[in-house]
Image (cartoon, rainbow, N blue to C red):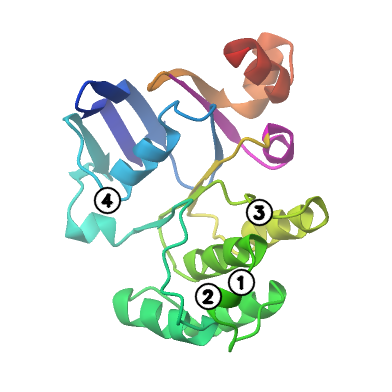
Amino acid sequence: MLKCNNLVKKYMQVTAVDGLNLEICPGKIYALLGPNGSGKSTLMKMIGGLTKPSSGSITLDGEPLNHKTKAKIAYMPTEAYFYNYMSCRDIGKYYQDFFRDFSYDKYIKLLADMDLKENLKAKEMSSGMMAKLKIAVTLSRSSEIVMLDEPLNGIDIIAREKIINTIISNISDETAVVLSSHLVDELEKIVDCAIFIKNGQCVLAGEAEELRQQQGKSIVEIYKEIYA
């Protein structure tokens, strides 16, 4: 279990995450929901170890985040982070060198599933291709926590269902998956749990079906009510 306790992140006078409490359990797919500026990406970056909390704590299986726990977390940011000269093949070798749990064979299969050629270079990719590549390298790791920040960004409406199915079919039952997206209607079809972030705080969280029954509304309708 990953647990955030009274988590705070401040940038000068701006509080991006404000006293957030959250638990993420294995074997579930979570939708991390909220508009731009709500704190979703900052939260993911703290869990991924890319930025430190101003206060509060994050633990994985009861242990504070360290180099060992961070090795169990795979994080895909919204930004493109590959050098332009790198080909898909280069990027796979790069990940293989850095992550012990990275499967190059799985990566090559995912590239084929995403219709990406191994010799295709980063500078030649469209935004949709880059989005697919980032998903492929992230899912090629065997991690306890997989976080995909806006995985459907740049993906056309026809390819979204295929991408979602690819994500679902390439995660284990012991893995917790956190998906952040503005496309709430797309996520509602597949997630087990929903987490609503507003002004850096978790204002509502729970099993998706329980939330629907309690609120008498769909996740999309709950989203509109919270953020309208």
Span of residues in magenta: 184-198
Measured in 3D between alpha carbons, the distance from the residue under mark 2 to the one under mark 3, in whole angstroms, is 15 Å
On the image, numbered disc 4 is attached to which residue?
A: 50
Spatial distance from mark 4 to mark 3, Cα to Cα?
24 Å
Q: Amino acid at mark 3?
A: Gly
**Mark 4: few, some, or many residues within 10 Å (few <14, many ≥20)?**
few
Element under label 1?
Answer: loop
- Callout 1 crowding tier (Cα within 10 Å): few <14, some 14–19, many ≥20: some
The percent position of residue 206, horizontal first and vertical second, equals 53, 24
Position of 140 relative to 36 (above/below): below
Reply above or below: 163 against 53.
below
Tag on residue 154?
3
Image quarter where the C terminus lies is top right
- Residue at 28% x, 22% y is 15
The residue where tag 1 is placed is: 125
Q: Nearer the viewer, mark 2 or mark 4?
A: 2
Task: Give the Cα separation between the discs numbered 1 and 2.
Answer: 5 Å
Q: Which residue is mark 2?
A: 122
Instruction: Determine if the magenta segment contains residue 122.
Output: no
> Percent position (x, y) of residue 29?
57, 43
Q: Residue at x 83, y 55 (%)?
A: 158
